[in-house]
Amino acid sequence: MELFNSALGKNITFFHPAYFIIGGFVGIPDIDYYFVFLCFIYILSFVGNTAVMTILFLDNRLRSPKYIAVFNLAFVDLLSSSALVPKVLDIFLFNHRYISYNDCLTFMFFCFTLISMQALNLVALSYDRLIAILYPLHYHVKVTHKRMLCLIAFFWLFAITSMLTAVGFLTRLSFCRSVVINSYFCDHGPMFRLACNDITPNVVIAGILPILILWFPLFFIVASYSSIGYALSKMSTVRERMKAFKTCTGHLSLVAIYFLPIVLVYAFGSKIHPNARIINLSLSTVIPPMLNPIIYVLQTQEIKESLKKLLKISEQSKIAMKT
């Protein structure tokens, strides 16, 4: 506890600036085209995730525990894109780089909470696939609506509590060196490194949270699919293996899209130019919410059939109105 004493001591006056300046994307030629590209991605993400949520809500057949997790993933993707992209466009495309202290902390809280929930949602879907393939006869007993809702509620509580803790420790810092955050949003690491008092608690949190929210979910997913792969190898026919594996392809695609860019940045972060790192991280936060609904619609037979049914009903209603 002594590590935290200097930052949590009593009768300490903390200097909080009136505003921060978001200083990312400096010196990149024709960067405005990139922001237009982000706007296009956001529109696709908004439409796609709204469509998936609508399909899952309207079709009573898609009310299994698995689709509770899929609905929550689409919901989180929609919120994460809406929390990040419009503000990034406002900051850089319209040159509103000044952001007030409280708004910056709020911006950070929502962005990191929703990004964390994307990874934790993939854990819930991995758990669903693990039980479905390893214990197919007990699936409906082990994976119930109540258990899936409790799991997702726990993930929400964990993500919100973790981010409130991280943001809360930032309020114990005095920013008397600089107010320029070298990132594309109010990023936790670049922000606490601007402080001029003890940042030990923030460094500890910055080391622990990625393990809990990024690396542990990835480890669980890899371990789950190792077990799934072993179980599939025990199946008697290739046809049975392919049929079982096909139910996992959508989820595996989501895992690869979400984790690979982040892992690459962590692995080669020190060797990558700051601007390249910022672009890579910004893409890794906006591309998955755009691709997730496309992957699930194209690779999930139940959702494809439901979409076809809804489109057919829509066409029949239009014809009926014309006649």
Image (cartoon, rainbow, N blue to C red):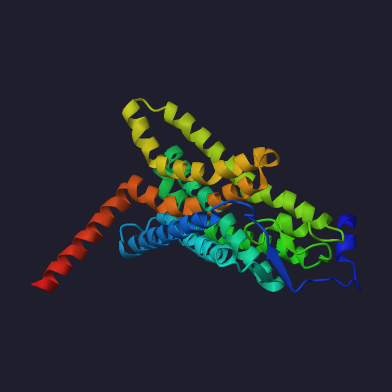
The structure residue drawn at horizontal position 43% and vertical position 39%, both measured from the top left corner, is: 133
Residue 267 in the image: x percent, y percent? 66, 38
Query: In the drawing, does residue 44 fall left or right of residue 319?
Result: right
The structure residue drawn at horizontal position 60% and vertical position 61%, both measured from the top left corner, is: 111
Query: In the drawing, does residue 250 fall left or right of residue 91?
Result: left
In the picture, the quarter occupied by the N terminus is: bottom right
Number of marks in picture: 0
Frontmost residue, 52 versus 82: 82
Query: In the drawing, does residue 81 fall left or right of residue 16?
Result: left
Residue 193, by quadrant, is bottom right
Residue 4 seen in this snapshot = yes
In the picture, the quarter occupied by the C terminus is: bottom left
Frontmost residue, 199 versus 101: 101
The structure residue drawn at horizontal position 67% and vertical position 42%, both measured from the top left corner, is: 269
Using the image, determine if residue 94 lies above or below residue 29: below
Frontmost residue, 31 versus 125: 31
Query: In the drawing, does residue 259 fall left or right of residue 315?
Result: right
Residue 145 seen in this snapshot = no
Residue 264 in the image: x percent, y percent? 60, 39
Residue 283 in the image: x percent, y percent? 53, 50
Using the image, determine if residue 81 lies above or below residue 234: below
Residue at the extreme left of the image, as rendered: 323
Residue at the extreme front of the image, as rendered: 29
Residue 143 in the image: x percent, y percent? 46, 51
Using the image, determine if residue 200 lies above or below residue 170: above
